[in-house]
Image: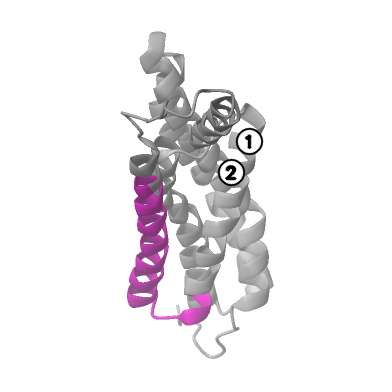
Amino acid sequence: ALDTAALVRQKVTELSAALPADIKIIYPIDATPFIKLSIESVVRTLLEAVVLVFLVMLLFLQNFRATLIPTIAVPVVLLGTFAVLLAFGFTINVLTMFAMVLAIGLLVDDAIVVVENVERIMSEEGLPPKEATRKSMDQITGALVGIAVVLSAVFIPMAFFGGSAGAIYRQFSITIVSAMGLSVLVALILSPSLCATILKHKTGEKRRA
């Protein structure tokens, strides 16, 4: 919408050169300032959400290294989602940005599950990070995929709405579903790799049977 408005203004400026001097062109309705303000507001909310997610995870995990792993997953998934939107020909608008904000709370769940389970195995069994990560992924891979399928199944039907409402909700649905799919890929590939390299081996914490 913003690009279209800019092109219209440019074309009107070109055509106005051929008009009489006493004719003045005005724009009685111009929604571009509102659209810009709305997008800026949602972007600010998106950044605030990322910061709050980091602080909440740090509060409950009590481990900066463990908190860093889900935090890294957030921008990776969001960048991938932007690429999906570009592939579908969608633009960055209020609806897609709102879907991004909503997806943040969902996509960090997968990474948190991976980190928490790896730390639990390291603490209970005294395994080094690499072995603990391998064992953890054997336990939770199916659950991660199942969670993504269930969450995606909730939003996929929105993509098949008809009419003008369908065109609007389709962008929202595809944004959420693509974020969920990328979240699982990150949780299965990137998060385990980070766990194996970033987390420290906690020696002497193996529980006695």
Mark 2, residue position: 82
The disc labelled 1 sits on which kind of residue?
A: Leu
Using the image as rendered, state which of residue 208 and residue 188 is in the foreground. 188
| Dominant secondary structure (helix, strand or loop) of the stretch shown in magenta | helix
Where residue 42 sits in the image (x, y, percent)?
A: 37, 50
What quarter of the picture does the C terminus occupy? bottom left
Magenta stretch bounds: 37-66
Q: Is residue 189 magenta?
A: no
Residue placed at 50% from the left, 23% from the top?
20
Residue 25 visible from this viewpoint: yes
* Residue beneath disc 1: 86
Please give left or right for residue 155 compared with residue 192 in the image: left
Query: Considering depth in this image, is 60 or 50 the residue closer to the camera?
Result: 50
Residue 128 seen by the camera: no
Task: Give the image location of residue 54, x and y in percent.
Answer: 41, 69
Q: Residues at badges 1 and 2 in contact (C-beta under 8 Å)? A: yes
Few, some or many residues within 10 Å of mark 2 (<14, 14–19, 20+): many
Q: How many marks?
A: 2
Q: Residue 129, located in which quarter of the rendered image?
A: bottom right
Measured Cα–Cα span from mark 1 to mark 2: 6 Å
What residue do we see at 60% from left, 83% from top? Answer: 201
Q: Secondary structure at mark 2?
A: helix
Q: Amino acid at mark 2?
A: Phe
Query: Helix, strand or loop at disc 1?
Result: helix
Instruction: Give the quadrant of residue 32.
Output: top left
Query: Residue at point 49% right, 78% down?
Result: 123
Sort mark 1 into few (<14), some (14-19) or many (20+) by Cα contacts within 10 Å: few
Residue 146 % position (x, y) = 49, 37
Residue 148 position (above or below residue 133): above
Q: Is residue 206 left or right of residue 195?
A: left
